[in-house]
Amino acid sequence: MEKKLEKVESIVEKIKFNAHGLVPVITQSYYSGKVLMQAYANEEAIKKTIETGYATYYSRSRKQLWIKGETSGNKQKVVKIKVDCDGDSILYLVKDYGVACHTGEESCFYRNIDFKKEGKPDPYEVLHALYKKIEDRKRQKPEGSYVAKLFEKGSDKIIQKVGEEAIESVIALKNRDKDEIVYEVSDLIFHLLVALVDAGVKVEDIQEELLKRYK
């Protein structure tokens, strides 16, 4: 335990806190890359985060530590902590269990600069956003939904569609037509996401497996 505490002390010593003893903390989803929130931490909050593994911040209004999700249940399991080039701000990469924003939105940054809510996800998070949309379609079964109809027809139909799209992707790749490749491979990935939802496998599970292949 002493060695662990010494390591924590050496890490914290390198961070440049402001005149109030605080440092800005950006919190980002480990899997989707979505920026979830921005808050502040003091030395004690960072130590607590390292020791417990859960995102801990300092409330400037209440003047006390607060653990994200302590009352709401929307906890943030910290996977990595990064520091910027100047050492005066830090980044929590987290596995988030629930929403980050008090409004009920997944991220506190859900509006553009004109204060209008974003309609579509950003490219880096599109796989996770599509997966959630497909989950919603499965659960809500909206009338006229192509995805809802696929789920109604069952697993065999979904798997059949994956096979069909895979063949079309192979043909497109053989033809070396970029537009055709982009269209058909996108179709394949979309139907694979439907199949993953049907099988109860998450995008995060695939990401973890792919990480093992990065050698």
Image (spheres, rainbow, N blue to C red):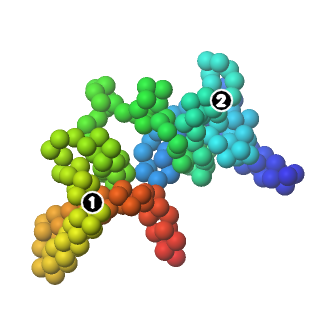
Of residue 16 and residue 94, the one placed in the foreground of this image is: 94
The percent coordinates of residue 107 (x first, y second) are 43, 36
Query: What residue is pinned by disc 2?
Result: 66
In the displayed structure image, the side of residue 210 where residue 125 appears, left or right = left
In the displayed structure image, the side of residue 150 where residue 35 appears, left or right = right
Query: What residue is pinned by disc 1?
Result: 154
In the displayed structure image, the side of residue 193 where residue 17 appears, left or right = right
Q: Amino acid at mark 2?
A: Trp
Looking at the image, the residue that sits furthest to the front is 153
Residue 132 visible here: yes
Residue depth check, mark 2 versus mark 1: number of the one nearer the observer: 1
Tell me the distance, in whole angstroms, between the alpha carbons under discs 2 and 1.
45 Å
The quadrant holding residue 60 is top right
Please determine whether, in this image, residue 152 is positioned above or below residue 209: above
- Count of picture labels: 2
The percent coordinates of residue 124 (x first, y second) are 35, 52
Q: Are marks 2 and 1 in contact (CB under 8 Å)?
A: no
Looking at the image, the residue that sits furthest to the right is 2
Q: Residue at x 20, y 62 (%)?
A: 187
Secondary structure category for the residue under label 1: loop
Q: Residue at x 76, y 48 (%)?
A: 8
Of residue 74 and residue 157, the one placed in the foreground of this image is: 157
The percent coordinates of residue 36 (x first, y second) are 47, 39
Q: Amino acid at mark 1?
A: Gly
Secondary structure category for the residue under label 2: strand
Looking at the image, the residue that sits furthest to the bottom is 174
